[in-house]
Amino acid sequence: MQDFAGRVAVITGAGGGFGREFARLAAALGMKLALADIAAEALADTVDELRGRGATVLGEVVDVARSDEVARLADRTYAAYGAAHLLFNNAGVGCGGYVWENGEADWQWVLGVNLMGIVHGLRHFVPRMLDAEARGEPAHIVNTASIAGWIAPPLMGVYNVSKHAAVALSETLHHDLRLAGSRIGVTCLCPAFVTTGIAASERSRPAALASGAAPTASMRLAQAALEKAVRSARVTAVEVAQQTFEAIRAGRFYVFTHPQILGSVRARFEHALAGQPPADPYAARPQARPPAADVEP
Ligand SMILES: NC(=O)c1ccc[n+]([C@@H]2O[C@H](COP(=O)([O-])OP(=O)(O)OC[C@H]3O[C@@H](n4cnc5c(N)ncnc54)[C@H](O)[C@@H]3O)[C@@H](O)[C@H]2O)c1
């Protein structure tokens, strides 16, 4: 997609981080916006800021893990604007720790947002995008995955699984669309650490999916490592948003915002193809490797 002015962008997780930067850029390009987030106040801040700059903005409090709420977002978007040209399935959360110590609620929460959030976005928007494409309207979908969709570092199991799923879903979406004769674009965004609110994901965990237990030593260690990595990130959310829009313009599928990590991705595949044990995800940055955490009894 080359022309953005007057077109409609739908963005989940628009209350902060990447989502807010996508919204700022889309508004600056003259797009109409449908913004969603589970956090009402954070969403209102983005909506107010962009309306203050003259943008046309619809704000919906939505839990992307719930199909009915994403369906409502789609219904309201089409009722307001009659179209959705650019869909950012971006909302995401994370939790860490030894993979056997994460409870069922952790899996339900993170897979509910990071995987099913994208699934619901696709189910409720793609059929209408295909319908509009038959009338000459272009569309493009951006799924926010992560470099954790390409390497599987320790203490991040639930998140790694969710982001590998997001990559697989995005690639299959691309193939399915082409098989169906559609030219709808797909971009799979794969950043490494960037300073956003991601290390404070627990703030948006629904009470019904509370972990119900005090964090284990490995969970505390994972949280400390995440906070440090996110705090010391060198790539900014603004740069991630800019690179993503460049990819949309160019029709590019993969966006790797931290090219220095691609050596670890290459090593992962080389080890697999050579029949070796998994490559060390921290080989390029040994200083980032977390220390061993005590195993809880
Ligand atoms: N920041 C990083 O280092 C990094 C790296 C790779 C990938 N990502 C991914 O980028 C995406 C955006 O995260 P971010 O880094 O901007 O973090 P962020 O916490 O700043 O923003 C995420 C937004 O999603 C919202 N959200 C959380 N649960 C939701 C739900 N159930 N329904 C709707 N909205 C919900 C939050 O309220 C928040 O506003 C996520 O998918 C994340 O996994 C982040």
Image (cartoon, rainbow, N blue to C red):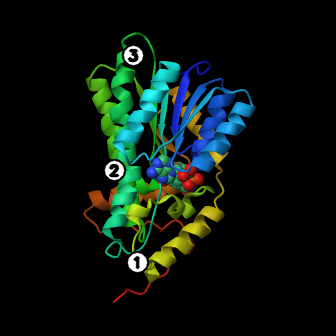
x and y percent of residue 284 in the render? 52, 65
As shown in the figure, which amino acid type bears the numbered disc 3? Glu
Quarter of the rendering containing residue 73: top left
As shown in the figure, which amino acid type bears the numbered disc 2? Ala
What residue is disc 3 on?
133
Of marks 3 and 2, which one's residue comes earlier in the chain?
A: 3
Label annotation for residue 165: 2
Classed neighbour count for the residue bearing mark 2: other residues with Cα under 10 Å, few (<14), some (14–19), many (≥20): some
Residue at 64 percent across and 52 percent down: it is: 235
As shown in the figure, which amino acid type bears the numbered disc 1? Ala
x and y percent of residue 45 in the render? 67, 44
Q: Quadrant of the C terminus?
A: bottom left
Q: Is residue 94 above or below residue 245?
A: below
Residue at 54 percent across and 29 percent down: it is: 9
Q: CA distance from mark 1 to mark 2?
A: 27 Å
Farthest right residue in view: 53
Quarter of the rendering containing residue 129: top left
The answer to whether mark 1 and mark 3 are in CB contact below 8 A is no
x and y percent of residue 250 in the render? 53, 27
Label annotation for residue 213: 1
Residue at 36 percent across and 55 percent down: it is: 111
